[in-house]
Image (cartoon, grey):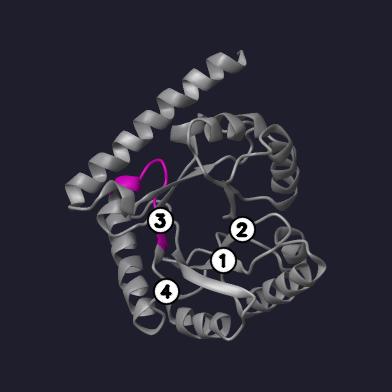
């Protein structure tokens, strides 16, 4: 496929996804500008992110540190004038914190005190070394079921983690993130997340972001207050195979 063919394909997909978001907002009585679109580019090349940036996209997400690090650097070489933000949305090990804060503007998968401390320390060091210019925005990933291996803290752990983040100037609490349980009812999951978000905002009014909804369930997420939908397949197509 030529670059122009891929650009046209991505433009069509982007139009369709934005139309879905617009319709979901209309159905929920919300304005379309209340919901950001985050392009999940994992397993896709930096050239796709560059083409999406040409089409107006400014928010991109990755879930593996090494792939992201290389892609962010390649994207910067392809589009040096582009102003975009990169999000880490995958589970993050503490020993990857130092590497992640060098390229990520936002980490959406914070779910433990040890990870908060690792990111705080790594961000402070990166700021001192000139490897980043501003604090790290973070979201608390909330587990909406009892499944293990998908990341996320228990709802009861949200308040103490939020308080811990607010005690440091190196991290900025922006809100919550969640993935609907596999095989579960998205409406139930996202309604629960909405309640958790509302409680968080009572103590931390600046934590207004709700990152929820993907290609298959974004309409449900928007109906329950999502401010950011994370879309990969519907935007870029089926996932490409990657090496372990």
Asked whether disc 2 touches disc 1, contact meaning CB atoms under 8 Å apart, the reply is yes
Residue that appears at 46% across and 83% down: 159
Q: Is residue 185 magenta?
A: no
Which comes before the other along the chain, label 4 or label 2? 2
Asked where in the image residue 22 lies, by quadrant, the reply is: top left
Judge from the rendering whether residue 12 lies leftward or rightward of residue 103; answer left or right: left
Mark 2, secondary structure of its residue: loop
Which comes before the other along the chain, label 2 or label 3? 2
Residue that appears at 29% across and 51% down: 220
- Read off the residue under disc 2: 105
Judge from the rendering whether residue 210 lies leftward or rightward of residue 98; answer left or right: left
Which comes before the other along the chain, label 3 or label 4? 4
Determine if residue 185 is in view: no
Which comes before the other along the chain, label 2 or label 1? 2
Q: Position of residue 73 (x, y in %)?
A: 74, 43
- Read off the residue under disc 4: 206
Which comes before the other along the chain, label 1 or label 3? 1
Range of residues picked out in magenta: 210-219
Q: Position of residue 164 (x, y in %)?
A: 57, 84
Give the Cα distance between marks 2 and 1. 6 Å
Q: Nearer the viewer, residue 211 or 32?
A: 32
Q: Position of residue 31 (x, y in %)?
A: 25, 50
Give the Cα distance between marks 2 and 3. 18 Å
- Read off the residue under disc 1: 137
- Read off the residue under disc 3: 212
Residue that appears at 42% across and 66% down: 145
Give the mark toward the camera: 3 or 4: 4
Which comes before the other along the chain, label 4 or label 1? 1
Q: Residues within 10 Å of mark 2 (few under 14, many from 20)?
A: many
């Amino acid at each position: 496929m030529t670059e122009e063919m891929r650009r046209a394909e991505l433009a069509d997909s982007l139009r369709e996804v934005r139309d879905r978001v617009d319709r979901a907002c209309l159905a929920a009585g919300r304005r379309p500008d209340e919901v950001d679109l985050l392009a999940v580019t994992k397993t896709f090349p930096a050239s796709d992110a560059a083409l999406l940036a040409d089409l107006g996209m400014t928010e991109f997400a990755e879930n593996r540190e090494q792939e992201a690090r290389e892609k962010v650097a390649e994207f910067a070489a392809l589009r040096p004038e582009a102003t975009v933000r990169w999000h880490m949305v995958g589970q993050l090990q503490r020993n990857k914190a130092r590497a992640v804060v060098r390229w990520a503007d936002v980490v959406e998968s914070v779910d433990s005190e040890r990870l908060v401390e690792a990111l705080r320390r790594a961000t402070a060091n990166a700021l001192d070394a000139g490897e980043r210019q501003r604090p790290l925005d973070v979201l608390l990933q909330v587990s909406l079921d009892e499944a293990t291996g998908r990341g996320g803290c228990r709802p009861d752990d949200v308040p103490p983690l939020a308080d811990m983040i607010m005690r440091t100037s190196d991290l900025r609490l922006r809100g919550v993130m969640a993935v609907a349980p596999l095989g579960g009812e998205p409406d139930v999951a996202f309604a629960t997340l909405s309640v958790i978000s509302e409680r968080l905002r009572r103590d931390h009014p600046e934590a207004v972001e709700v990152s929820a909804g993907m290609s298959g369930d974004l309409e449900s997420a928007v109906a329950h207050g999502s401010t950011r939908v994370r879309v990969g397949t519907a935007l870029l197509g089926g996932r490409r195979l990657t090496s372990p």
